[in-house]
Amino acid sequence: MDKENLKILAQNLANPQGEKGIEIGEMMNATNIGMTLESIKTLLIEDDEHILEIGHGNASHVKSILNKAQHVKYTGIDISETMHNEAKRLNAEFKNQADFILYEGKKLPFEDKTFDKIFTVNTVYFWEQPIEYLNEIYRILKDNGTLVLTFGQRDFMEKLPFTQFDFTLYNTDEMEETVSKSHFKRMKVSEKEEEIKSKTGNETVKRLYTVLTIKK
């Protein structure tokens, strides 16, 4: 890919738009599904819990969340109008259990202590003020709640040609340090490895990623 196409890819990974955004949303879901399912498993979802996902993409994985326990409610929030509309379309059958909210990316439009569990996969690179944003998540999480924060490690991400455009990358220690500056106080680290198809071609790459389980 030339520089201009890499830049377009990077922009659509951050905020998918239009027909190209739908296509990239499908590709993101395929390449991120391992990280997403690992994050969902780490949440340890129980009956009657309300789950928030930040940056849901096309959300074709929502069924996996709703099947984890009885009477689970899911809310997804995203900055992309394209992904918001795709998620609603793909999950129309779950409209009584799943809702989707479009927002501007900084203030989370929920009351304090709304959610039992919150998770986010591959979004932290785009948080403009990560400590303030973590404090927003803290605010809307119940006192005994869990945040699962999943991201590709810096050493892996730096090798991807599109991350030179407006991605902020972290290794595990840097992310732990960032979280420790927020209101959150406890976390458990799990480092993972998987083989995935590259976003820029057909070759497979070995992805190293981190799952942080964070508590108040």
Image (tube, rainbow, N blue to C red):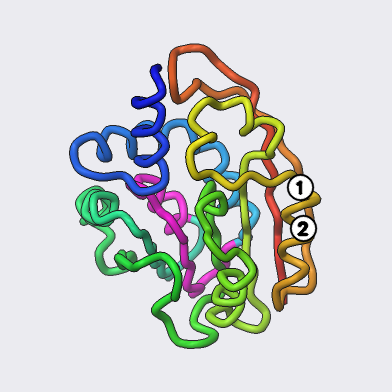
Q: Quadrant of the N terminus?
A: top left
Q: Position of residue 152 (x, y in %)?
A: 63, 40
Residue range highlighted in magenta: 45-67
Q: Are marks 2 and 1 in contact (CB under 8 Å)?
A: yes
Q: Position of residue 119 (x, y in %)?
A: 55, 60
Q: Please tell me the numbered disc located at residue 172.
A: 1
Q: Measuring 59% from the left and 19% from the top, which residue is drawn there?
A: 205
| Side of 214 relative to 88 (left or right) | right
Q: Find numbered disc 2 in the image and state the secondary structure of the residue it sits on.
A: helix
Three-letter amino acid code at disc 2?
Glu
Q: Position of residue 123 (x, y in %)?
A: 51, 52
Q: Quadrant of the C terminus?
A: bottom right
Determine the residue located farthest toward the front in the rendered image.
Answer: 3
Q: Quadrant of residue 187?
A: bottom right
Q: Quadrant of residue 210?
A: top right
| Side of 154 relative to 69 (left or right) | right
Nearer-the-camera pick, 89 or 167? 167
| Side of 166 relative to 83 (left or right) | right
